[in-house]
Image (cartoon, helix red, strand yellow):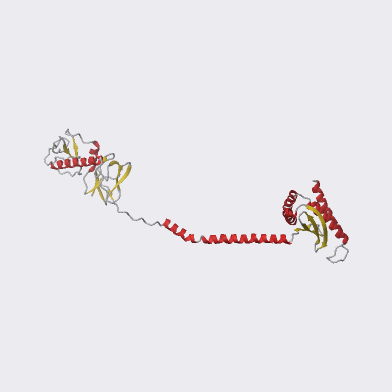
Amino acid sequence: MKQWFRKAALCFALALSILTLAACGSSQKDTVETIDPSVKTALEEQAKQYAEQSIYALSDEEIASQIQSAYKTKDEITYNGLTNYLNDKERLGDFVSVDDAVASKTEDGYSIVIDSTFEKRTLKLTLGLNETTGKTTEMTFEPHYSLAEQMEDAGANLLVGMGTVFAVLIFIAWVISLFKYISVFENKMKKQKTPAEAPKKTEAPKAAAPATPAAKQDDVMQAVIAAAIAAYEADTEGTASENGFVPGPTLQNGLFVRPLRGRSVSSAPVETASAAPVVTSAVPAAPVAPAATSAAASAGTQGAVKVESPMPGKILAVKKSAGDAVKSGDVILILEAMKMENEIVAPQDGTIASINVSVGDAVESGATLATLN
C-alpha cells in the first residue's frame, strides 16, 4: 500500500507541476517550439523520478498487475507501453541508473525523453503529457541494439518469414496433389451405388425330394377315396335303408360305401349337391347329424352356379338367404380357416338359389356352400 501511495503521489505531483508551470508561462508569447527553462527543468526531474520509482523499480508481477489495471480502465497507452517493457526486460537485464531526461514542447503538451542504463543495454523511454489534463499521451520503450544484434534479429525474422512461406507452399502443394484421388473416390462411390450384376449360375435341376411320411399317408388316403368312389358309382341297384340312404356294395374288407347325402328311393327326381363319399365301417348307418339336416333343409332348389369352399374351415356367418339378388363380389358367407375370417363372395351377378351350409358347419375344400341362378 505504501508503494502504491508513493506512486500515486509522484504522478499527482508531476501533473500538478505541469499545470502550475503552464499557468505561470501562459502570458508569454513564445512559439510552440519554445519552453520555459524552469518548466523544462521541473518536467525533466519529475520524469526521472517517475521512470525510476514507478516503472524501473517494479517487479514483473507488479508490472503485470498494472497492465491488468490499464486493461480494465481501457488505458491503451499505458497497457501497450508496459507490455512492451515487460517483453524487453529479459534482454535489458537489471536496472542500473537513469542518465538523462530532455523535455520538449508539442502541440498538445510536452514530450520527455529519458535515457536509462541497464545491465545489458541502454533504453530510451519517451513520455508524452497533455498540457491541459496532465494525462499520459505517449509511453514508448526503445532498447538500444548494436548493429550486429539488429542484423541477427533481421536474419532471424527473415528465416521465420521464409520458413512460414515455404511451409504454406508445401501444404498447398500437398492439398493439390490430393486432387487426383477425387476421381478415384467418385468412381468408387458410383460402384457402391450401382454394383455390377453377378453372372447368374445355371443351377442343375434338383432331384425330387423323397416323399415324407405325411405325403405317403395322403397318397394312401387318396387311393382309398378313389376306390370308394368307384365302388359307389358301381352301385346302381341298391336298396334304400330306413334313413333314406342307398348303400353301395360291400368291399372285401367288410367296408361299404355310402354318400354324405343319400339318394331317395322316391320316384320324384330330387336335385342334390354332389358330395364326396366316405368310407365307414360295416355297422348300421348312424342317423344324420342335426347340422347337416338343417343345412339340407335350407338348401332349397339347387342353382346352376356353385359357390365352393376354397379351403377347409368352419362357417362363421351366413350373409345371404335363398332368393336374394346378388352382384359379383357380394359377400355370401364368412368362412373361418387357419384362424382367419375369409369372405365367400358371389362369382357373378344372379339370385341365391340355395344356401347349403349353416353357421357352425365344418366344411372341406371344394364343398358346395351355395348355388346361384
Residue 121 appears at what percent x and percent y? 76, 56
Q: Residue furthest top?
A: 283
Residue 28 appears at what percent x and percent y? 88, 64
Residue 249 appears at what percent x and percent y? 13, 38
Q: Is residue 172 visible?
A: yes
- Relative depth, front residue between 358 and 364: 364
Q: Is residue 74 visible?
A: no
**Image quadrant assignment for residue 101:** bottom right
Q: Residue furthest front?
A: 148
Residue 189 appears at what percent x and percent y? 45, 57
Vertical placement of 281 versus 36: above or below? above
Marker count (numbered): 0
Horizontal side, residue 105 vs residue 189: left or right:
right
Horizontal side, residue 252 vs residue 5: left or right:
left
**Image quadrant assignment for residue 80:** bottom right
Vertical placement of 287 versus 199: above or below? above
- Relative depth, front residue between 247 and 182: 182
Q: Residue furthest left?
A: 237
